Amino acid sequence: MHSTAAITFWALTSHPLREAPWAGDNRSPRGFDHPARRTLRKPGRECTALPVVNPTQIEARNLPRHVAIIMDGNGRWAEQRGFSRTEGHRRGSDAVRRVVRAARRLGVEALTLFAFSEQNWARPQLEVQLLMGLLREFLVSERGEILENGIRLRAIGDLTRLPTEVRRELDPLQNDSASNGAMTLTLALSYGGREEIADAAKDLARAVAAGQLDPENITPELLQSRIASVAVGDPDLLVRTGGELRISNFLLWGAAYSELHFTQKLWPDFEAEDLYRAVAAYQSRERRFGLTGGQVRNLRAAGSVSDEDVATLVPVAKGYAHGGR
Ligand code: FPP
């Protein structure tokens, strides 16, 4: 850890509101064993060392602003225990609650969870119904805490495919939390990265067909302006649980410069500490946005201290700084 980072974990101490309903999750520190001493730079092997990390080891100044998570492994978690997949998803919902609280306490500005993909509609009907039921239950049971804790809830994806009972909870919560600014929790529902890029392309094609746009003027920035998930910002850190090393059609555009963190942990076993571990691994990396290490160090020496400062100087990474978080 940098010498400047002997940080008191301000998010735990300076916002009493954050603590009130969720104090039960607030576990005592379990030792100082910084992950930078382990083999954390080897992609996909982070979790083999399973370093103990607690919030006091996380640098407040270099927090990822936006963490996105592919929550995988509910089914395997259940199978390993002789339970039905249903039970795995139920326990996955509990992990969602834990992680939202942990991210909020940590001070992350945006958390995006891949809760249901466009492709998940092809799962057995009963499993789809159960997932929709759990989603509805989550929206009902967490509504109070989301609003009390200043969280803005958003959803991305083809929401028109969601059952009415889900929309009945989702739509008012999106509206009622719209002016909250402590953290944005985005649920990706019926979401597909390729699908939303195709939608953006259709939009531009219509403008070309109507004679309003010259194809020569199509730039990454223009295409990006039509991609719905850009509104939640590019993830700084993309975590996937369950041991698979892929991003499965999640935030394909926004993840262009995300730091990836894979863990073997199955989603229902994912604890606050696993989030801290992912954040600590993120903080041990150098983000370069296509520049050389030397250029990045020069920029930082010249006072461009944050990743966002660096990203704004690199045209292709510009979107990074313009998310509506
Ligand atoms: C992947 O596990 C997980 C999902 C397809 C859905 C994620 C849903 C939840 C975590 C619960 C409900 C969500 C909310 C927001 C309350 P998998 O079934 O593919 O696991 P497997 O790969 O082990 O089969």
Image (cartoon, rainbow, N blue to C red):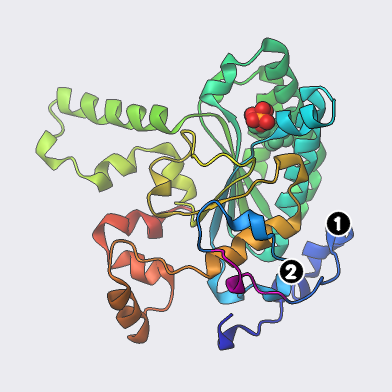
* Numbered range of the magenta stretch: 33-40
First of labels 2, 1 by sequence position: 1
Q: Residue at x 73, y 66 (%)?
A: 52
Task: Tell me the crowding category of disc 1: few under 14, some 14 to 19, or many 20 or more residues within 10 angstroms, Cα based.
Answer: few
Say if residue 271 shows up in the picture: yes
Numbered label attached to residue 123: none
x%, y% of residue 303? 37, 84
x%, y% of residue 253? 38, 43
Q: Which residue is mark 2?
A: 54
**Is 311 drawn above or below residue 146 in the view shown?**
below
Q: Quadrant of residue 12?
A: bottom right
Q: Residue at x 48, y 68 (%)?
A: 285
Say if residue 303 shows up in the picture: no
- Left or right? Give the position of 125 relative to 2: right
Q: Amino acid at mark 1?
A: Pro
Task: Tell me the crowding category of disc 2: few under 14, some 14 to 19, or many 20 or more residues within 10 angstroms, Cα based.
Answer: many
- Left or right? Give the position of 296 relative to 14: left
- In what element is the residue under mark 2? loop
Q: Which residue is mark 1?
A: 21
